[in-house]
Amino acid sequence: VFWSMGLYTSTFEDHFGASRARITLIETFLSVAVNVMSPFVGIFVDKRSARHLVAIGVASLGCGLIVVSFAGTLLTVWAAFATLIPFGVLCTGVLPSSTLISRWFRKRRGLALGISVTGTSIGGAIAPPLLTWLFLVYGWRTALLATGIFVILMAPVFYKVLANFPEDKGLEAEDEGDAGEFHLAEVDSYDWSIREILGTPAFWLQTLITGSMLAVTLGLLANLALHGKDLGFGDQQRALLYSVIAFCSFAGKIGFGALIDRIGVRYSGFITVAGMITGLSLLASMQSYSLVLVACFVIGMATGGVTPVWTNLIARGFGARSVGRAMGLMNPLHIPITAPSAPLAGYISDTTGSYFLVFLIYIALMCVAAAALALVRKPIPKGDSNKQAG
């Protein structure tokens, strides 16, 4: 869904003949809907079954893609990206996977969370060129119909293999081992209430950090193909840009996950921010395809750190018993930052004729994330100042 967003936006621009600001609203509808649904899904994951939720989400995602394949107007596309697709994305994404991983791992939680999100990078490396080929050979409707059916068929697979707790497989959660400095066993033992989560400054700083990072990432993915189109790049050339980012993101997620276990979330976050600023600066100043590929390489490595930093800030701060609630509450608060990112970039491109100003705005957002990282501290439950919580 996300890595192929540039393909969707460029295809729908040609098919529906709408402005880029209207086309990129699909990213906004997707982002807003995911965030609005997030608190309810987060509570369900913490209190009920992630296994059932993921299976339902996979089916929802597949149905959403099928609806888009039959869309006669842009309104139908918006509707699918505001209902079925975001519910599927949410139920099969970072929120349930972070909860499940945090229940199983302590000593290597950073690495485990990093590995758990590499699936999106694998899909991101394969999907854009594959879908581009399918779009060109069979048309975008047939391609999305076939993709939707394939996704639905995966639902029983997830239901079969997932386990909510290690005990479900006759196992125990990983021991904390030499990672005692993080006090994760103690963090995991505390069950945060919604009032406590909302009452700690660390939660709001984490929201600002992750919201800024996600706004840049999502906005860039939605507009990169359009930027390449402006520079005269062909369809497969634009698809390759996404593949480069995805492949590098795959390595970055594992690398940053392991790095977080060694140097902590804060310093890993600073490295992520520095990489994003470097890559965005290159995009703003370079126009040749080879140099844009270099920029995508740098951005891919840096974006690999975004999700591990995001999930570890929450998992190490609020613990395995409260990851779903904390992330679920945080996601709607991202809306003011993430929702305008893609359409605002499209609007700026429509009015100025380039993405130069967009890249400068994204660099500024990464500086905001760095400042918040410098200020964030470990969350402590109110009324228990002696309890370590992160």
Image: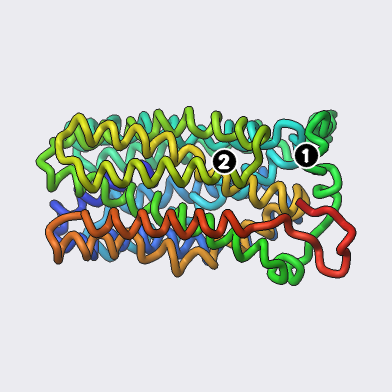
Task: Work out whether residue 138 can be spotted.
Answer: no
Instruction: Name the residue beneath numbered marker 1.
Output: 165
Question: In terms of secondary structure, where does tag 1 sit?
Answer: loop
Instruction: Tell me where residue 85 appears, x and y as whole percent.
Output: 43, 53
Q: Quadrant of the N terminus?
A: top left
Left or right: 54 as drawn, with respect to 181: left
> Of helix, strand and loop, which one carries label 2?
helix
Vertical position of residue 345 compared to residue 235: above or below: below
The number of discs equals 2
User: How far apart are the alpha carbons under marks 2 and 1?
Assistant: 29 Å
Q: Is residue 185 left or right of residue 300?
A: right
| Residue at 26%, 40% in the rendered image | 142
Residue at x 88% of width, y 64% of height:
384
The residue sitting at 67% across, 67% down in the picture is 201
Q: Can residue 234 be seen?
A: yes
Residue for point 19% across, 39% down: 139
x and y percentages locating residue 361 in the rendered image: 32, 60
Binning the other alpha carbons within 10 Å of mark 2 as few (below 14), some (14 to 19) or many (20 upward) gives many
Amino acid bearing label 2: Ser
Query: Relative to 273, does residue 341 appear above or below in the rendering?
Result: below
Q: Percent x, y for residue 335?
A: 47, 66
State the residue position of label 2. 268
